[in-house]
Amino acid sequence: MAGVIRRRARRQRLLRWVILTGLGAFFLLPLLAMVEFTTRGAGGTLSLETWRLLIDWPRLSETYPDLSVGIAASFGLVVLTVLLMLVLLVPTVIWVRLRLPRLHRVVEFLCLLPLTIPAIVLVVGLAPVYAWVTYFLGGSPLTLTFAYTVLVLPYAYRALDAGLAAIDVRTLSEAARSLGAGWLTVMWRVVLPNIRSAVLSAAFLTVALVLGEFTIASLLSRVNLQVAINLLGKSSATMSVAVSLAALLLAFVLLLLLSLVGRGRHRTATKELA
C-alpha cells in the first residue's frame, strides 16, 4: 500500500512539473523573443542601444516626442484614476455595507454594469459627454480619467467587496461606536486598515487596466501609452516592442510588490494574534 502511495505521489510531482514547465515556456518564450528582437543590432550583433534610449528620457523625448507624451499621459492617468476610484468607491462600499445593506445589490449592479458593455459602445455613449469635457477642460489626455474610472469599477468593486466580506465589519464598527468613535473615524481608522490588501488589489487592477487600455483613448483621439505604441510600431518596431516589454515588466513588478505587501501584513497579523 505504501509503495502505491509513493508511486502516485511521484506521478503527481512529475505531472506538476510538466504542467509548470509547459506554462513557463508558454509565457517566457514570447518575452525572450521580445528581448532578442529589441537587442538585435546590425549584422545580427547584440546591441542595447534601444534600451539605453528608452531609459534616457531627454533623448527619448527628442527622438520620439509622441511616445514621451503617451508615457507621461499614462502615468498621470494612473495616479488620477487610482485616486478618483478610491475616493469614490471605498467610502461608498463601506457605507453601504455598514448603514445601507439593502442597497448592496443595487450598488453591485451599477458597478458591474460597465463589464457587460463593450468598449466601443461605451465610447459611443461617452463621445457626447467628452464633447462637453473638451469644451470645459480642454483636450488633455488626462480627461480620460473619468472614462477609466467607470471602466475599472467592476474590478475594483469586486476586490473591495471581497475584502469587506472577509472581516466582520458590523462587529468592528459597533465596537468602535460604543467607544465613542464617529462614522468617519470608524471608516478611516477601523475598517480601512483591515481591508488594506483589498485596497491595494483594487489599485493594482486599476493600474494594469489604465496602462493597457487602447480602444477608448484611440476612439476619443487621446494619446496614451498604448496609442503611442501603436503609432510608433509603424515607424520603429524595435522601440515599440521594447516599450511594450517594459510595460509588461512594470505590471509584473507591481504584482510582486502587491503580493509581498499582502504577505508581510499577514505575517504581522499572525504575530499579533500569537
Image (cartoon, helix red, strand yellow):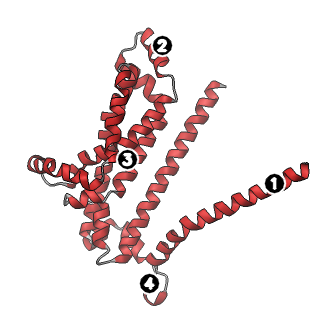
> What's the amino acid at mark 3?
Thr
Locate residue 113: give its quadrant.
Answer: top left
Q: Is residue 263 above or below residue 207?
A: above
Write the residue at 31% across / 61% down.
Answer: 225
| C-alpha gap between disc 4 and disc 3 | 36 Å
> What's the amino acid at mark 1?
Arg
On the image, the x and y values in percent for residue 204 come to 42, 46
If you read the primary sequence from the N terminus, does the residue marked by circle 4 or circle 3 appear first? 4
Q: Which residue is mark 3?
A: 206
| Labelled pair 4, 3 in contact (Cβ < 8 Å) | no
Write the residue at 26% across / 56% down.
Answer: 120
> What's the amino acid at mark 4?
Gly
- Identify the mark at residue 175; answer none if there is no mark: 2
On the image, the x and y values in percent for residue 79 come to 32, 47
Write the residue at 36% across / 77% down.
Answer: 237
| C-alpha gap between disc 4 and disc 2 | 66 Å
If you read the primary sequence from the N terminus, does the residue marked by circle 4 or circle 2 appear first? 4
Helix, strand, or loop for circle 4? loop
Front label number (3 vs 1): 1
